Image (spheres, grey):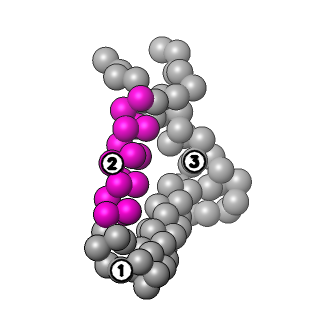
Amino acid sequence: MKIRSNSPSWISSMLFFVGRMLGLERSVLPQIAEVGFAIRAILTGTIAETFGIEMSILTIGGLTVLSEFVILLRMKKVG
């Protein structure tokens, strides 16, 4: 079976390999997710302080929908 470069199994294998190179016990993926959560929290707080809580919720919701469209366009259905 040939693994395509955009295959989820290839991506997870690459992240696991990078984690091993860095001497981590587990994959790099949880660390990437944790950094993403932190950045999102800082962004949400900054927008809420500057423009209000409503704008903050709308902006983060819009970014979530935008990321879903990117995934829809970039990921290919396997199987």
Marks 2 and 1 sit apart, C-alpha to C-alpha, by 20 Å
Task: Tell me, yes or no, if residue 26 can be seen here.
Answer: no
> Regarding mark 1 in the picture, which secondary structure is present there?
loop
Name the spot of residue 55 as percent of width and height, x first.
34, 70
- Which of the 4 quarters of the picture holds residue 59? bottom left
Quadrant in the picture for the C terminus: top left
Marks 3 and 1 sit apart, C-alpha to C-alpha, by 37 Å
| Mark 3, residue position | 15
- Which of the 4 quarters of the picture holds residue 73? top left
| Mark 1, residue position | 52
Q: Is residue 61 magenta?
A: yes
Residue 65, numbered label: 2
Front residue of 38/42: it is 42
Q: Residue visible at 52% across and 28% down? A: 6
> Is 25 situated left or right of 30 in this image?
right
Magenta segment boundaries in residue numbering: 58-73
> Is 38 situated left or right of 18 in this image?
left
Task: Tell me, yes or no, if residue 35 can be seen here.
Answer: yes
> Regarding mark 2 in the picture, which secondary structure is present there?
helix
Q: Pointer 2 and pointer 3: residues touching (CB < 8 Å)? A: no
Q: Residue visible at 43% across and 85% down? A: 49
